[in-house]
Amino acid sequence: LVFDLNPAAIHHWDSYRLLSAHIAYITPRYNLEDRKMEMTGTRQNPDQPINSFFVRDSGTDLWNVYELFLRLTYHDSHQDPPPGCSNWRVLHASVAIPSPPQIIRSAIRLHPWQIKEFDEHGNLPIHIAAKCERPQGIDELQYWLAKGVNRTPIHFRLVDQNLPRDHPISILVEAYPAGAKQLDSSYRLPLHYASLLGKPVHQLISAAPLALATRDGRERLYPFMLAATGGHLTETFQ
């Protein structure tokens, strides 16, 4: 009902640059034992996050609530399929918001075919993650969770040494390395977008080294040129 009255509110950032979807994840009907189980499972065995989410009913409730907010944020609709789309793709939406790493990993495990599926705009999930320009919080240690929200040790979603591994691009490359070699509808590789926007590129380069010598299909520029255009040359290719 609230969404129907004011659909635009779903896209509003609060003072911590959090969307409603992020707040729904941070403050679920979720007790301390559930949170400990999720955190322990994510840190110690990140390749099997489904165990962390769905051991308890409250974890399933958390997933269902978060998925609803993903639908509302990504498509401005709770219809299934969404307007203008043939299918609801939770993985594409989860990297566009962007979502916590355990959400993305769980989406891959639940819907493994989606990591190789182009959407109606010609994007794989890895293209969306590379071109996503949504603000990602103001916390230098956590790309999605802003400073000042549930900052007790049990609520830390990421620890410093896990940052490179837990970025959406890293998760997607690890799950589907060939995605780094795929062109989108604009004839651009994920590396082109990541270079332009100053996103992590090392995993993309490792998976598709020839991409460094590939011009993009729009401006005919190499990745390092796109990085320079976006003002990210030093930080991206240091």
Image (cartoon, helix red, strand yellow):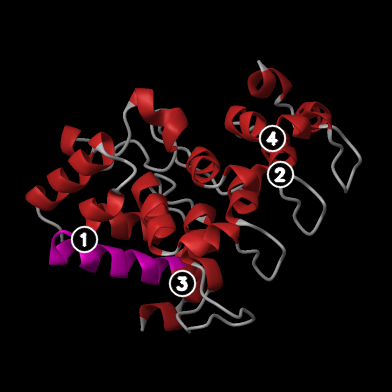
Compared with 174, 74 (above or below) is below
From the image, which quarter does the N terminus lie in?
A: bottom left
The residue identified by callout 3 is 72
| Residue 35 as seen in the image, left or right of residue 146 | left
* Coordinates of residue 140 in the picture (x, y in percent): 43, 28
Give whichever of 156, 42 is nearer the camera. Answer: 42
User: Mark on residue 54?
Assistant: 1
On screen, residue 73 above or below 155: below
Name the residue located 38 percent from the left edge and 67 percent from the top edge.
67
Residue placed furthest toward the right: 220
Question: Quick one: label 3 or label 1, which is nearer the N terminus?
Answer: 1
- In magenta, the rendered stretch is 54-70
Closest to the observer: 204 or 22? 204
Q: For the residues labelled 3 and 2, say whether their Cβ atoms are less than 8 Å apart.
A: no
Q: Nearer the viewer, mark 3 or mark 2?
A: 2
Looking at the rendered structure, which numbered label has been put on residue 208?
4
